[in-house]
Structure formats: structure tokens, C-alpha cells
Image (cartoon, helix red, strand yellow):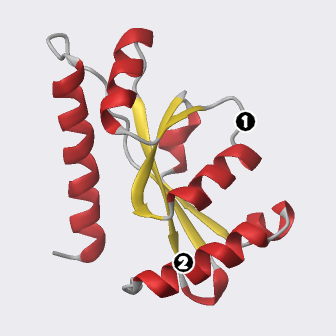
């Protein structure tokens, strides 16, 4: 069962995770949807959970991946490079563990401009968030 985290508890969990040495942090990570990240070059850092912890995980363990924290900027970069983008979210769990989720890739349709692609990115994240919350 997923727990709801208050803003304060999220920030405290985030601070603890950011202070951990890389190996200790790695031991506390549980990955969901890793297969989506396997071939992805462009990762969008989701505002859900902790973007700061997601950035640290990306820097430590996912070298060579381009990342963006903003859907419109990510859409422009994806269109320019012809890439599919994958949302990455780091969410705290009980006992200092973190779930790192990679959502299915979102690729541009032939008639997409940056605005349309950014909307599809946001819709994908919103759908995932609703499912995670069970609403």
C-alpha cells in the first residue's frame, strides 16, 4: 500500500537520502519500469516525489542520460533530436527506501509540435499519478 507523505516528511526523507553515500543509497532503491529506461536517452524528471533525489540517482547510476525537469523544454529537445522521453520519479517509501519509477516512453507523433508533445508528457504523468494514488 502506498502511503501519502506530508510535505515535511517528504523533505526530511529527501534530506536523508541526499546525504547517503552512493552505495547506501543504491541499497535503498527499488525500481519500477526499468525496462522503459533501458533504451531511453532523454529522461524527464517528474515533479512527483522528489526531483532532487531523482537527479542524484540519475547522476550516480544512469550516466550518459540526458535529463530535463520541464515538459515543454523536454518536448523541444526530443523533437530536435528525434528522441522518445521517459518520465523518472523518485518517491519515498517506508524505512528509508525509495521507489524509482520509469513511465512508458512518449514519442512524438508525426504532426506533433513542442506544445502538443509537452501536453502528452503531462497527460502521461497525470495518468500515472492518479493510478498511483488509486483515484
Q: Secondary structure at mark 1?
A: loop
Q: Which residue is mark 1?
A: 63
- Place of residue 106 in the rendered image (x, y in percent of width and height, measured from the top left): 32, 33
> Observer-nearest residue: 43 or 13?
13
Q: Quadrant of the C terminus?
A: bottom left
110 relative to 84, above or below: above
Residue 91 shown left or right of residue 1 in the figure: right
34 relative to 90, above or below: above
Residue 100 shown left or right of residue 124 in the figure: right
User: What is the spatial separation of the Cα atoms under label 2 and label 1, in whole angstroms?
Assistant: 25 Å
- Place of residue 7 in the rendered image (x, y in percent of width and height, measured from the top left): 42, 81
Q: Quadrant of the N terminus?
A: bottom left
- Place of residue 88 in the rendered image (x, y in percent of width and height, measured from the top left): 48, 49
Q: Residue 120's image quarter?
A: top left
- Place of residue 122 in the rendered image (x, y in percent of width and height, measured from the top left): 24, 44
Q: Residue at x 41, y 20 (%)?
A: 77
Badge 1 density bin: few <14, some 14–19, many ≥20, Cα 10 Å: few
Residue 1 shown left or right of residue 15 in the figure: left
- Residue 8, numbered label: none
Say which label, 2 or 1, has the lower sequence index: 2
51 relative to 27, above or below: above
Examine the rendering and report whether any part of residue 81 can be seen.
yes
76 relative to 51, above or below: above
Q: Residue 134's image quarter?
A: bottom left
Badge 2 density bin: few <14, some 14–19, many ≥20, Cα 10 Å: some
Kindly report which numbered mark, 2 or 1, lies closer to the viewer in this rendering. Answer: 2
Q: Residue at x 82, y 61 (%)?
A: 22
Q: Which residue is mark 2?
A: 11
Q: Residue at x 65, y 83 (%)?
A: 96
Examine the rendering and report whether any part of residue 40 can be seen.
no
The total of numbered circles placed on residues is 2
Q: Secondary structure at mark 2?
A: helix
Amino acid at each position: 500500500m502506498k502511503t501519502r507523505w506530508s510535505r515535511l516528511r517528504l523533505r526530511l526523507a529527501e534530506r536523508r537520502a541526499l546525504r547517503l553515500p552512493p552505495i547506501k543509497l543504491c541499497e535503498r532503491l527499488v525500481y519500477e519500469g526499468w525496462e522503459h529506461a533501458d533504451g531511453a536517452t532523454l529522461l524527464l524528471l517528474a515533479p512527483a516525489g522528489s526531483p532532487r533525489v531523482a537527479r542524484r540517482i540519475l547522476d550516480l547510476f544512469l550516466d550518459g542520460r540526458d535529463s530535463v525537469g520541464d515538459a515543454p523544454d523536454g518536448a523541444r529537445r526530443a523533437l530536435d533530436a528525434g528522441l522518445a522521453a521517459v518520465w523518472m520519479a523518485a518517491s519515498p517509501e517506508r524505512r528509508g527506501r525509495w521507489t524509482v519509477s520509469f513511465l512508458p516512453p512518449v514519442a512524438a507523433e508525426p504532426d506533433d509540435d513542442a506544445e502538443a508533445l509537452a501536453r502528452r508528457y503531462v497527460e502521461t504523468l497525470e495518468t500515472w499519478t492518479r493510478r498511483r494514488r488509486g483515484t
